[in-house]
Image (cartoon, grey):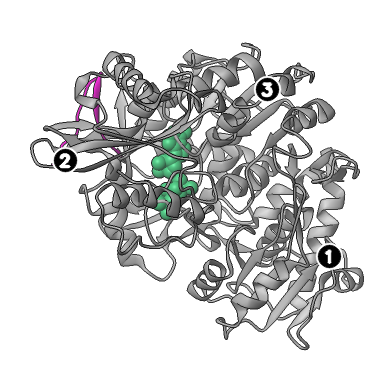
Amino acid sequence: MSNYHIKHLEEYFQVYRKSVRNPEDFWEEVAEEHFFWRKRWNSVLEWDFTKPEIKWFDGAQLNITENCIDRHLRSRGDKTAILFEPNDPNEEAEHITYRELHERVCKFANVLKDQGIKKGDRVVIYLPMIPELAISLLACARIGAVHSVVFAGFSSTALATRINDCGAKMVLTSDGSYRGTKTIDLKGIVDEALQHCPNVDTVLVAKRTGEEIPMQKGRDKWLQPLLDKAYSDCVPEIMDAEDPLFILYTSGSTGRPKGMMHTTAGYMVYTAYTFKNVFQYKEQDVYWCTADIGWITGHSYIVYGPLANGATTVMFEGVPSYPDYGRFWEVVEKHKVTQFYTAPTAIRALAKENLDFVTKHDLSSLKVLGTVGEPINEEAWHWYNDHVGEKNCPIVDTWWQTETGGILISPIPFSTPTKPTYATLPMPGVQPALVDENGKEIKGNQVEGRLCIKFPWPSIARTIWGDHQRYKDTYFSAFEGKYFTGDGALRDEVGYYRITGRVDDVIIVSGHNLGTAPIEDSINEHPAVAESAIVGFPHDIKGNALYGYIILKETGETRNRDNLKKEINQLITEHIGPIAKLDKIQFVPGLPKTRSGKIMRRILRKIASKDTSNLGDTSTLLNPEVVEVIMKESL
Ligand code: ATP
Ligand code: MG
């Protein structure tokens, strides 16, 4: 039996039981057999959730890039490591082999060193989805610098806040970026941000769009000439297991973003392990995750997890709608993609379009489909399963967070039978618990509660950068001795988990706890509905009542609104019960979303409660204009 690669359900249960009975032995075996260490650990795990302090493989020494690149050179030197698919389908895709990746990372690392970056320094990366982005993460890791990637769709204000929060003195960016038909002036955004960042003394600029841009003398330098001059080998910095690898800010769906700090060894072991199992990666596979590297999904499952397994990982610069809504499927066909990993928001957007965009492409290379980021509603799940997977590809609904570093709950394809809207079972080493509002663990099945994790797993974030107290308050104070995820979940009759939404979003109506996901799920079943969001608002008798914001499909626009409202409440009554009927329904042109595509319910909640004087931090909002419209038409 291999702990590292689970191949059937019985094996999963065996491995899982072992991982819980003796987590240290379990992870030690995985770490020993599958990674390259410069020095062995003194202890596998030391932890104390009250402080909180967590150390995995303490005393060990390694460099993560040796594990992601160097050790593959002998056996996989000519294998494609990164397959870059540009925004413009007429521009040629780029196949970067492991050998080339080694050279490019080394050169980049030497440039960083020449520019004065040392172990422990923070480097903010504000780059589009071009190879330099992945390479720059690895270049930082090569020399022990701490990278902090800021998604290149964020505003200058959001960028400046993050640069200052992590104390970076260098920013990596490009002249511009392509997104579909648009060209974005990235360097201009950086210039604006840097007016508020006195500590940044160097900006390295990659060339992508070729746009004429101002370069500030002494501060801004073109990257390419420096790379051309750089030496093509770079001795890796030997890092301690618990040295910081990166800082990454959460999406900001619920409030001020938190700079989660991840460390080296545990993060490497856990992302590699989960990548192998959740995607059942095999040597010849071509794996594609459509996330941006600016999110944790991109860090763990475009860069580190796949490369640690010697995989071929696709990096896509463009958007799903350019040149048309078939782009994803065109790329799958073109590169014979075997594993495809995306977000429910993308699936819903594509499901709204003509089915021809999917059916005209040959998707027979696909083996596994994945989703992450939000609860996936049943309709979207079936669309994905029927039309993309052609009922042949298990869907892995992966639940995890920026804080968790890697996937914690997910089916293992070909082992765990899937169930729509269920993330199903915990990964080996992960010990979930549902607790009630008093922190008491709710045992048994067919129960619902707040989702906590009782025991550390290797890639748990170690702190919030510069604010350990906030880390403790946010995750370890609500329920003693447990990591609190902020999400609610139910456990069904066989022990499968379903994430029901964020606990802050749970609405208590006449004493009943109602999660948002199942209600929205039933609304979305209505053929005229494209998407919906539910929030609570104060009600004299019920305590709270439900307010629904609903986007109609084009075909629904012409329908009588009063009838629609009745039918929607009818559906809710059938699926959940009359308690969950909506008191108010507002049809809206769009919903306020974060740039990672998640609904910002806290804004909708304020509008529904008529408390719009202070909407809180909206700097991560994708479409602020829609907030105005919703406010104007609110009921
Ligand atoms: P912030 O913490 O700043 O409010 P965020 O929670 O949106 O932002 P992320 O770490 O990117 O930032 O997202 C993690 C959250 O996304 C989870 O806590 C959960 O609410 C949701 N989520 C992720 N994957 C799933 C999934 N498969 N099913 C349901 N919900 C998911
Ligand atoms: Mg969160």
The verdict on residue 447 being magenta is: yes
Q: Nearer the viewer, mark 3 or mark 2?
A: 3
* In the image, farthest residue toward the left: 541
Looking at the image, residue 216 sits to the left or right of residue 224; the answer is: left
Q: How far apart are marks 3 and 2 (CA)?
A: 45 Å
Which quarter of the image is occupied by the N terminus? top right
Viewer-nearest residue: 494 or 541: 541
Q: How crowded is mark 1: few (under 14 residues within 10 Å), some or many (20 or more)?
A: some
Which mark sits nearer the N-terminus, 3 or 2?
A: 3
Between disc 3 and disc 1, whose residue precedes? 1
Answer yes or no: is residue 601 visible: yes
Indicate the amino acid at tag 1: Lys
Which amino acid lies under the numbered mark 2 shown in the image of this protein?
Glu
Question: Which range is magenta?
Answer: 437-451
Query: Residue 159's spot in the image, x, y percent?
Result: 56, 68
At 44% from the left edge and 39% from the top edge, which residue is drawn? 588
Q: Can residue 429 be seen in this view?
A: no
Question: In the rendered image, which quarter is residue 401 located in?
Answer: top left
Residue 122, percent from left and from top: 59, 71
Secondary structure mostly taken by the magenta-highlighted segment of the chain: loop
Horizontal side of 130 relative to 289 (left or right) equals right
Is the C-beta separation of discs 3 and 1 under 8 Å? no
Q: Which of marks 1 and 2 is in front?
A: 1
Q: Which mark is residue 354?
A: 3
SS for callout 3: loop
Question: Is the CB of the residue bearing disc 2 within 8 angstroms of ligand 1?
Answer: no
Q: Label 2: which residue?
A: 437
From the viewer's perspective, is residue 585 above or below residue 254? above
The residue indicated by pointer 1 is 207
**Under tag 2, what secondary structure?**
loop
Residue 206 in the image, given as x and y percentages of width and height: 80, 66
